[in-house]
Image (tube, helix red, strand yellow):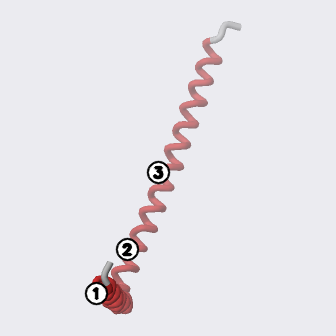
Amino acid sequence: MSYGRIAVFAAGAVVGGVIGYAAIKSGTVKKATRATIKAGLKAQDWAKEKCVKAKEEVKSMVASGKKEIAEEKPV
């Protein structure tokens, strides 16, 4: 690899870093980031709630099935 290509890559990395840093410091980007994180946390809570409900329903169905099996057995 030539030194020219390395220099161009390094310069691009520096410019990209500076632009990224400036974007992070921007008030608009901070607001958008907070909103995104807030939405993600809400989605996480929703998913956890649905998972717990589904788990409870499955446990209920298993218990019901076991009860039916026990009732079918001749004594």
- Indicate whether 3 appears above or below 43: below
Q: Earlier in the sequence, mark 1 or mark 3?
A: 1
User: Residue under circle 2?
Assistant: 36
Amino acid type assigned to the residue bearing label 1 in the image: Gly
Amino acid type assigned to the residue bearing label 2 in the image: Thr
Q: Position of residue 28 (x, y in %)?
A: 31, 88
Q: Earlier in the sequence, mark 3 or mark 2?
A: 2
Q: Position of residue 58 (x, y in %)?
A: 53, 37
Tell me the element at label 2: helix
Q: Position of residue 38 (x, y in %)?
A: 42, 73
Q: Nearer the viewer, mark 1 or mark 3?
A: 1
Q: Nearer the viewer, mark 3 or mark 2?
A: 2
Q: Is residue 27 visible?
A: no
User: Residue under circle 1?
Assistant: 4
What is the CA distance from the residue labelled 1 to the residue labelled 3? 56 Å
User: Residue under circle 3?
Assistant: 50
| Mark sitting on residue 74 | none
